[in-house]
Image (cartoon, rainbow, N blue to C red):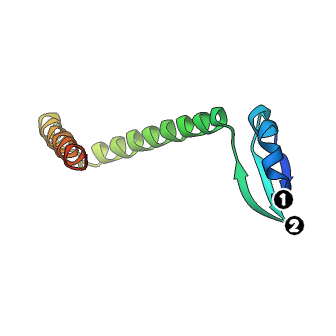
Amino acid sequence: MLHSETAKVSDFPAQFDSVAKSRGPTFVMRGRKTAAVVLSPKQFRAYADARERMDILRAIEEGRREALSGKGMPIGQLRTKLARELRRRARARTASR
């Protein structure tokens, strides 16, 4: 079950310790509406990790469906394509520094 807390915008600076200790999100309210949702760094990392795992599983499932329908590509061609993409990204990172 998701544990959460609620804080008013005007009280928020005083709420940082509470957010850091909280086991769930803190909903920041403006009047009766949610203005923001704040997570501790630990909570955010857990969310980001879970999101990444879901994205990977989604991509695997998409690839499986493509392979079953004959839309895939041979592994050698895939490796070549991935190597090109990794080199392109490395050049882009180097150029942006």
Inter-mark Cα distance, 1 to 2: 13 Å
Q: Is residue 47 left or right of residue 76?
A: right
Name the residue carrying label 1. 10
Q: Nearer the viewer, residue 34 or 65?
A: 34
Residue 64: give x, y in percent of width and height: 35, 40
Instruction: Single out the mark in the foreground, 1 or 2.
Output: 1
Name the residue carrying label 2. 32
Classify 10 Å Cα crowding around label 1: few (below 14), some (14-19), many (20 and above): few
Residue 5: give x, y in percent of width and height: 84, 45
| Residue plotted at (66% across, 36% down) | 43
The answer to whether one can see residue 2 in this image is no
Classify 10 Å Cα crowding around label 2: few (below 14), some (14-19), many (20 and above): few
Q: Please, what is the three-letter code of the amino acid marked with disc 1?
A: Ser
Q: Please, what is the three-letter code of the amino acid marked with disc 2?
A: Arg
Q: Is residue 50 left or right of residue 93?
A: right
| Residue plotted at (31% across, 47% down) | 66
Q: Quadrant of residue 68?
A: top left
| Residue plotted at (82% across, 38% down) | 18
Mark carried by residue 91: none
Q: Quadrant of the N terminus?
A: top right
**Label 1: which secondary element:** helix
**Label 2: which secondary element:** loop
Q: Nearer the viewer, residue 57 or 88?
A: 88
Q: How many marks?
A: 2
Residue 3: give x, y in percent of width and height: 81, 39
- N-terminal-most mark, 1 or 2: 1
The answer to whether one can see residue 92 in this image is yes
| Residue plotted at (77% across, 41% down) | 16
Mark 2 and mark 1 in contact (Cβ < 8 Å)? Answer: no
Q: Nearer the viewer, residue 6 or 69?
A: 6
Q: Quadrant of residue 45?
A: top right
Q: Is residue 69 left or right of residue 20?
A: left
